[in-house]
Amino acid sequence: MSDLASAPNAPWLERKGSREMILQAFVFVGLGLLAVLFLLPLLWMVSTSLKPIEETMKMPPTFIPTSPKWENFREAVQRIPFLRYFGNTVWVSVLGTVGVVISSSLVAYGFAFLRWPGRDLFFWLTVATMMIPFPVIMVPLYGVFRKFGMIGTLMPLWLPAWFGSAWDIFLMRQFFLGIPKDLLDAARIDGATEFQIWRKIVLPVAAPVMVVVGLFHVIYSWNDFLGPLLYLTKQEKYTLSLGLQFYQSQSGGTEWHLLMAASVLMVLPVLVLFLLGQRALIRGITMTGIKM
Amino acid sequence: MSPVAREPLSSRVGRAEFRWAMLFIAPWIIGFGVFLAYPVVVSLFYSFCEYSVLAKPVWIGAGNFRDLADDDVFWISLWNTFRFAAFALPLGMIFSLGLAAMLHICAIGRATFRAIFFLPSLVPVVANAIVWMWMFNGEYGLLNAGLKVFGQQGANWLGDPFWSMPALIFMGFWGVGGSIIIFLAAFQEVPVEMYEAAELDGASSWQKFWGVTVPLISPVIFFQLITGIIGVLQVFAAPYIMTGGGPMRRTLFYSMYLYDNAFRYLRMGYACAMAWILFLLILALTLVATKISARYVHYQGS
């Protein structure tokens, strides 16, 4: 898919010289103002993270800190076991993402390319489960992890990903169905096993959708709050989400400069991901929202 | 379809394909069973039980549901959730549709604007919540600083029984980036030819937008509505962190009360009963939305 941002603008718009110019000007100014409003909370976060505590309590506030206090970041990282939280979150994200990409692509291959009795029924059952709100399974799921002795460990946060996720299986199957069958049949005639076809043909061709699924899962793991809240009991196992919330509730909302510094550090990896993978993210969101 | 005739499943080759299929599907059979099907069935069972984790579940029939009917906090949380949904969902959709339309019109800098609107939707919910607590801060928050410029005295937004709910709804606009992307892509996928007939009739831009563009993307709008309903009724993390349900339970949402019942009061059966009611509500609302929009949603080729 080409990047739609470069597509020509509204074809339904009348091209009547001056009137269109005026409309364009209005829209541009409007978008500009809204863009500033959208960026404001992030800029305010960065601004506060660089202020000494007295300056956070100044009215009217200074938007650009009088002298940026970079030590806030060091202090925030030391105040909470930030690196530990960070490491835990990376661990959960990486293991979960690797798991979900491998397992979901295997399962999607089974749904898209192999014939077996009950396949379509099971597939639609899989799709239907996406309607089930999480609270329905929350309590028994907790029981499952308790039975496995995983409460208090990071495992409930990444292990399920290794057994596929309905959403990702669905997404990948849709993509796989667009791959020409001849490609697979040719390989079968050459004596390739299904596993070899999955690895050597389907995975490379499906790289774009793998990237999408992977990126979404990283962002999901980084974002997840309810999961850690349910399963993590010891502070040394906290993820960034839970750790930051814990610190927030402990500090009672006074050390805003440190809270903002920690928030900046939590958002930073997402920002990097956004800058590197914006195209894939947008492609993925478009895929899920339109190509159903 | 396939140029090569595939063997029937009963043949040797067919059986081999079946074995491969089971190998490929195996993770999901386990995942589906252990992390989905089993919890769903057990949850339904628990919803008719008294269950505190510490002791075995005891069957009490419809007891939980009867208790819920008499539980004021249950009704408060349901009402709060509906109030939130009734504003956040339609307003959010109109806002993102409007922004997408503006981006669609915009000829200069569209990619940049789109990126800016999209970025906040990626901010992790905890960071998002903490930043907005600071934005909404009654004494030193940016919002009140801005209001002061206009000579207005701002409230202590999140601590105010009236303003806490509007504040949470307002904050939600910040995260509509995903919808904007979807609507913009939908706008851009409308084939140019679709406008030709309208042009021959001498339709204005406004008429073409409402008469052609919007009907053609109505399936996308509908899909956003359905996923929106499912999502908005489960709102949890942001209010949990920002208000904890207060002040005076004004922002106590359904999922928060459900969570409290399950993991604070250890009334697991009661929580499961709540979860099933939520599920039925989502199904009912989805059905209603489908029925109502059937008249307006335009599927191409039908």
Image: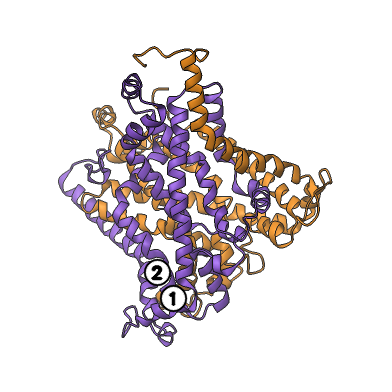
Residue A4 or A157: which is nearer the viewer? Answer: A157
Drawn colour of chain A? purple
Q: Is residue B2 above or below residue A121?
A: above
- Residue B175 visible within the image: yes
Q: Quadrant of the N terminus of chain A?
A: top left
Drawn colour of chain B? orange
Q: Which picture quadrant has residue A14?
A: top left
Check disc 1 and report the residue beneath it. A77
Decide: marks 1, 2 in contact (CB < 8 A)? Answer: yes
Residue projecting furthest to the left: A17
Check disc 2 and report the residue beneath it. A265
Residue B17 or B116: which is nearer the viewer? Answer: B17
Select label 1 or label 2 by which is in front: 1
Residue B211 or A240: which is nearer the viewer? Answer: A240
* Callout 2: chain: A
Residue type for callout 2? Leu
Residue A270: x %, y % from top left = 38, 59
Say which residue appears at 46% left-offset and 42% top-offset.
B224
Q: Is residue A210 above or below residue A226?
A: above
Residue B259: x %, y % from top left = 66, 57
Mark 1 element type: helix
